[in-house]
Image: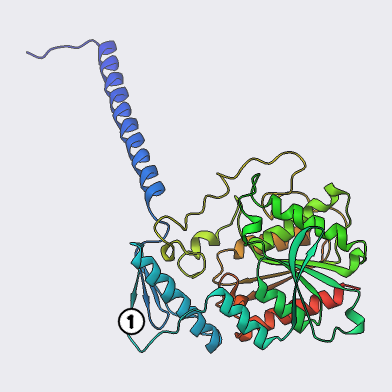
Amino acid sequence: MTRFIPRPRIFLFLAGLVIGCCAVIAQSQRQDEKLDTELLVNAPTVPQMVVDSDGTLHFGPRTVPMPALASPEAKRAYIAWAVQRAQASAARGGLASVRITEGNVAEVPPEPALKVAALKIYPVLEEKQTIAGVEITVYSPKMLPAKNRHKVVMEFQMAVEAISIASLGQLKVIHFDTAGPSYRDRGGPAGIPAIVDIVTVYRELLKTYKPKNIGMFGASSGCRLAQATVMWLPEQKLPFPGAVGLNSCAGGSNPGDVRNTLNGLDPALSTALQPPSGGRNSGGRNAAPRKPGDPPATPLDGEVAKGYPPAFLIAGTRDMCLSETVLLHRKLRNAGIEADLNVFEGMWHYFWQYPELPESREAMAAEANFFNRHLK
């Protein structure tokens, strides 16, 4: 005997079945999303990496050879750095390992040795000074040309680029060691103590030099300081300098697409080549909050004020800060600012730290010429 179920009950039964199924599906989706989130948060950006002694990189499904169009000197430097960073990562239980398949790989000189090499290639005078209570180093040619005696350039972060510009441009360059201990652990939001010191020195220089005769530039975090300082000058009621060099700005909450797509190719910044506790980009989320009137936190923050100086920008095609540099270039161009973007094939973050590379000389010579054209 067939049991008859009234039609309304059938509808209620089916509706309950559908609702139950939807609840199960929704719960399953929430669990999957939670699992995916946990996996994404805890997983490294780059999987296990193997670096060959010829510079070939293997990570995940990718095998990436050395860039064919880089100079032989750049290839040797790249291989040395990638192998050395991979060996250091492996020694600390990191994600990278090294497969030596041919000969010996050159060692990467420590930063003091790179400075010594730069002084041999670009001989200049070096003098420690204190300006308005701030310790700086002055690099200048042995015979400063008369046409450049009224010019000065402020450099942040990298002694090698300060030396290079002083020699190639025949310019007086004031170097701020913003990576040194005097700029660390001074409290407040990141970068502000260094920017305050830079502005303090700039005020003092304005007593002797015209603003149009002063340049500012920096590399990596020094690039971020250069941009933040220039953007902050109107707030301080100070004039803009005559030119600025923005050499691959690093840091901030908006690093761009290549921070992910080039991760693994940049020996300076790639997460797989960092110790297990390092290499994660917090995106500025943990930075101390800024107050109204503070300098910008990232190179892409804030409106470009009228009178912003001509800008020179450098990056490489394997530079994880390439996006930020390209976006900053476009931001300046959209504001009507003269901006000269220079992107070097196969080069990594702050490659010009190696003074013997042809690409480094070309980049620094172009920047030196830029300053000489724009500092009147």
Q: Which residue is most to the left?
A: 1
Q: How is the image coloured?
A: rainbow
Tell me: residue 231, above or below residue 309.
above
Frontmost residue, 51 versus 184: 184
* Residue drawn at x 62%, y 54% as measured from the top left: 184
Frontmost residue, 337 versus 375: 375
The quarter of the picture where residue 324 lies is bottom right
Q: Is residue 182 left or right of residue 269?
A: right
Q: Is residue 364 left or right of residue 337?
A: left
The quarter of the picture where residue 9 lies is top left
Asked if one can make out residue 60 in the rendered structure from this viewpoint, the answer is no
Residue hosting label 1: 100
- Tell me the amino acid under the disc marked 1: Ile
**Which quarter of the rendering shows the C terminus?**
bottom right
**Which quarter of the rendering shows the N terminus?**
top left
The number of callouts visible is 1
Element under disc 1:
loop
Residue 89 position, x and y percent, is: 39, 66
Frontmost residue, 316 versus 62: 316
Residue 217 position, x and y percent, is: 74, 67
* Residue drawn at x 51%, y 81% as measured from the top left: 77
Q: Is residue 132 left or right of residue 326?
A: right
Residue 139 position, x and y percent, is: 76, 76
Tell me: residue 197, above or below residue 369.
above
Asked if one can make out residue 57 in the rendered structure from this viewpoint, the answer is yes
